[in-house]
Image (cartoon, helix red, strand yellow):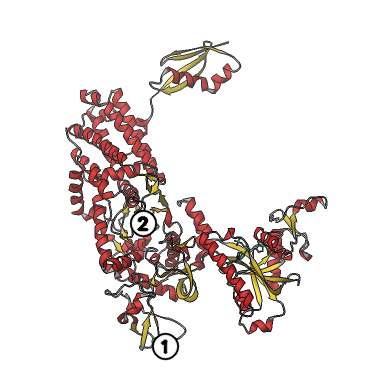
Amino acid sequence: VVRYNPSEIEPKWQALWDADPSLYAAESHECGKPKFYCLEMLPYPSGQLHMGHVRNYAIGDALARYMWMRGHNVLHPMGWDAFGLPAENAALKNNVPPREWTIANIAAMKKQMRRMGLSYDWATEVTTCLPDYYRWNQWIFLKMFEAGLAYRKKSKVNWCPECCTVLANEQVINGRCWRHEETLVEQRDLTQWFLRITKYADELLSGLDKLEGWPEKVRTMQRNWIGRSEGTLVDFAVAGRASELASQLVSDTITVFTTRVDTVFGATSVQLAPEHALTKAFCAEDAALEVQVAELLEQQQKAKEAGDVGAIEKHGVATGRFAVNPFNGEPVPIWVANYILADYGTGAIMSVPAHDERDFEFAQTYGLPVKRVIAPAVSQVAGAAAEEPALPYTGEDEAVLINSGVWTGEGCVEAQAKMAAFAKENGFGTATVTYRLKDWGVSRQRYWGTPIPMVYCDCSPEEPIPLRASDLPVVLPPQIEITQQGGSPLGRVPEFVNVICPRCGGPARRETDTMDTFVDSSWYFYRYTDAKNNTAPFDSAKANYWFPIDQYIGGVEHAILHLIYSRFWTKVMRDLGLIKNDEPAERLFTQGMVVKDGAKMSKSKGNVVSPDLMIERYGADATRMYALFAAPPDRDLEWQEEGVGGISRFLNRVYRLVTKYSETATQRDSESGLAGGESVKGKALLRKLHQTLAKMTLDFSGRWHFNTSIAAIMELVNDVQAAEPAMDSGEIPTATVAEVSRILVLMLAPFAPFFAAELWSQIGGEGVVFRTPWPVADAELAKDDVLEIPVQVNGKLVIVITVPVGSDEATVKAAALVDAKVAARIEGKTVVKVIVVPGKLVNLVVK
Ligand code: ANZ
Ligand code: ZN
C-alpha cells in the first residue's frame, strides 16, 4: 500500500517551486486578464511565525490559488513591517545591531513561509526598514509638509515610560500602552510632528458607508473613533474681569461646544476642564483653587486610566467668577469640573442640568439650580394638564422649547439651526462640527524607524526646513549605541545630527525623531505593485491596475490603528495624484484568533503551539488545512493537535484512493462514461461530486467558509470509499472514476497545495495544478433524481408530489401530508390510514 508521506512530498515540491519563481509571479498590468489583488497583513519580523500567522496565510493562500484557477492575474505579495521597538530591545539585551537582528529574523520567517508552501511572489517583497522603501516615507512626508498636511506643534502627548517614546492616541488603550498592557501612559508637553488626518475626517467617515465589503464591526469601530458631532460654539463673556485677564494673555470669553444650543436658556453654570487655559489663569491668582483643580485633574487621569471617563464620579469647584449667557444676558457661575475633557470640543461646556444626565448628576451633588427649558411636544398640545416628564429630560425630536424667550414654542431641532444662525449674526457663536479624531502624532523618540527629513537652522528660527527630494534618503546611521537613556538616540550621533542647511548652506541640525512605524504600514501595499522602482514610490499605472485590493485579510486588532491610517494615506496619495482609488481595499476579512485551552496563544500563558512542530509531525498541508477546517475563518479557533492528526488521516485516505486509481484516471473509456454511463452508482457519485463542487464555488465567492467546503469534500470522499467495490468491478465506468479523481485533486489544491501537486502529477494531470481552470459544477449532473408520486385522498387524486429517488416510506408520507392541497382536503377530518406503495402512490383514508 502506498502511504502518504508529507515529509517527502512537501520538500520535493517546494524545491521545484523555488526553482521557478514565475510560478507565483504576478503578470504585467498590461496582460489583459482580470486582476485579483489578494493581500494578507504583513508581519512584524519577530523571528518566528505563530499560529495566528499560519491561519491568516492559509486563508489568503487558498484564495490566491483559487483565483489563479479562475483565470485571474493574481498579485499575492508578502513583506516585513520591519521597524519598531523590539529590534531595539533585542539590541539592548543581546548586543546585536537592530538591522542584523531584523534581517536574520526575516530570513528565518521566510524559510518558514516557504516550508508552508505559501504562494508569494517574492519578486515584489517589501522590507520597510531598508532605505529603498523608507526613502519614500520621507518623500511622501515632504509632499505632506508642502501641502500643509505635516506640521509641528507643541502639545500634550502620550508618553510610554516603557517604550521611552511618544504614542499616538490610537496606541493608547484604556490609558495604557498598546505594547505594554501594564504600563500607564503619561502626559508630557513636547513639540512633535503631526499628520493632519482630521482634514479627512468627514471623508473617512462617509467612506465607511460605501465599504460594504468590510465587516460591520470594523466600520462601527471606525465611526466611533472618528466621533463626528454636529453642534454650536457659543461665547460666554467672563463678567467684569476683562482687564485683569488680559494680563494673563488669555481670552476673556469662554467658548463652549454644545450639541444642544436649544437648551441654552437652561444653562445654570459654565464648566471648564481642569486643563483649560482659563482654569490655569484663575489658578495663577488663587492658590487654594489651584490645589483643588490639581485634585480634579488627578481624578480625571485616574478615570482615563480605568478607561471610562464617562463613568467618573463627578466633582468640581466653583471659581467664584461669572460668565454671561449671550442669549439672555444672565450671569452664571464658572466652575471647573473633573468630567470635562480639555481635548474635546473647546474644553468648556454650558451646563444644563434639566436636560443632560451628567450635568444633572453634577447639579444634584452641588445644589446648582435646575431650570426646565424643554418639554415634550405633545404635552404642550394637550395643555397644562399634561404631566411634566422626569428630569433630566433629554428628548429632542418630539420636543419643544419652553421658558426660552422669543424661542419658546420652537421645535428643538429647528431651534438648534436658528439659534446657531442667530449667534453667528450677532457675533457670539457659530454652528460647528467636532471630531473625537485627533491629528496623528508621528514623532517617535526612537532609533529604529524612518528619519524625519527635516532640519533646523538659525536661518529659519520659526520654521523647520524640509530637505530636498534629491537629499533623500536620509539613511539611519548603521552603528549606534542603544541605551535606555531618554531622548532620541539619533541625537547622540553627531555625524547624523550635523548637516548643511538646504536653504542657507550653513551648519544646521537634523530632526532626530523617527516616524511612527504605522507610517510604514500605511502604504506598503502600493509598493508591492512596483517594489523595485527607484525613481518613484511606484508607477501609478501599475497601482491603478491593481488597486483597490480585492481582498485584504488580517486580524481585527487592526480595526482602528492600521486600517484608519492606511485609509487616510490612500486619500492623501490620491490628492497628490499618485493613485485614483479612494479606499485601499474593496473587501476586508478579519479572521478569528487561534486559542489553546480556551485562551489566546501567548508566551506568557505558556500555551503556544509551534507551527514548526506541527509541520514536522503532520506536514504543512495538514497543518494549514486544519487551520481552515477547525472553525469558520472569522471565529476563534481552538487548536487541538488531534484535529491536525485527523486531517492528516483524511489526506492519507484520499492519497490511497487517488493513487489506487491513478492508472484508471489516465484512461477515458467513453464520453458517456463521463456522465456515469448506465451505472446508478456512477451517477450517484457524480451527483455528489458536482454538488460538492457547487458548494465550494459558493464558499469561495465571499463568505470564505472553508470549513464547510472541507467538510463537504470529506463527505464526498466517504462516498468514493463506499463506491470502491463498484469502481473495482467496473460497474462504475473508468471515465467516471477518472473524473472524480481529477476534480477531487483540483478541489483540494487551494487547501493542500503540496498534496495536490503530487497527486496531480500521479494522475497524469497536464501542467501546473494551480493554473488548471477551476472545474465548473454541472447543474444537470448535480441535480437530485426525483420521482413523481400521485397522492389520493379516499381514492381520489389530489396532487402529484415530487420526492428524491430512494426516499423511504416515512419521507414520502411526510411530503404528502405537508402538501397544502392535501392538508386542505383532510382538514377537520381524521386520517385513519396512510397507504404508501413505494415509488408509486400514496393514498390517505380519512373520516
Ligand atoms: C449643553 C448640553 C445640553 C449638552 C444638553 C448636551 C445636552 P457629543 O455628542 O459627545 O459630541 N461636552 C462638550 N465638550 C465636552 C468636553 N470637553 N468634556 C465633556 N463634555 C463635553 O457631546 C457633546 C456634548 O457633550 C455637549 O453638548 C456638551 O454638553 C458636552 F441638554 O452642551 B452639551
Ligand atoms: Zn539654514
326 and 692: which is toward the camera:
326
192 and 598: which is toward the camera:
598
Label 1 crowd (10 A; few <14 / some 14-19 / many >=20) = some
Q: Amino acid at mark 1?
A: Asp
Instruction: Quarter of the image for the N terminus: give it.
Output: top left
Q: Is residue 174 above or below residue 333?
A: above
Residue 198 at x, y percent in the picture = 51, 67
- Count of picture labels: 2
Instruction: Quarter of the image for the C terminus: give it.
Output: top right
Residue 475 at x, y percent in the picture = 30, 74
Report the disc number at residue 41. 2
- Secondary structure under tag 1 reads loop
Q: How many angstroms separate mark 1 from mark 2 (CA)? A: 43 Å
- Secondary structure under tag 2 reads loop
Labels 1 and 2: the sequence-earlier one? 2
Q: Residue at x 28, y 54 (%)?
A: 120
Q: Amino acid at mark 2?
A: Met
Q: Confirm or reject: label 1 Cβ below 8 Å from ligand 2.
A: yes
Q: Quadrant of residue 37?
A: bottom left
Q: Which residue is mark 1?
A: 458
Indicate which quadrant contains ligand 2.
Answer: bottom left
Q: Is residue 350 visible?
A: yes
Residue 804 at x, y percent in the picture = 41, 24
Label 1 with label 2: CB-CB less than 8 Å: no
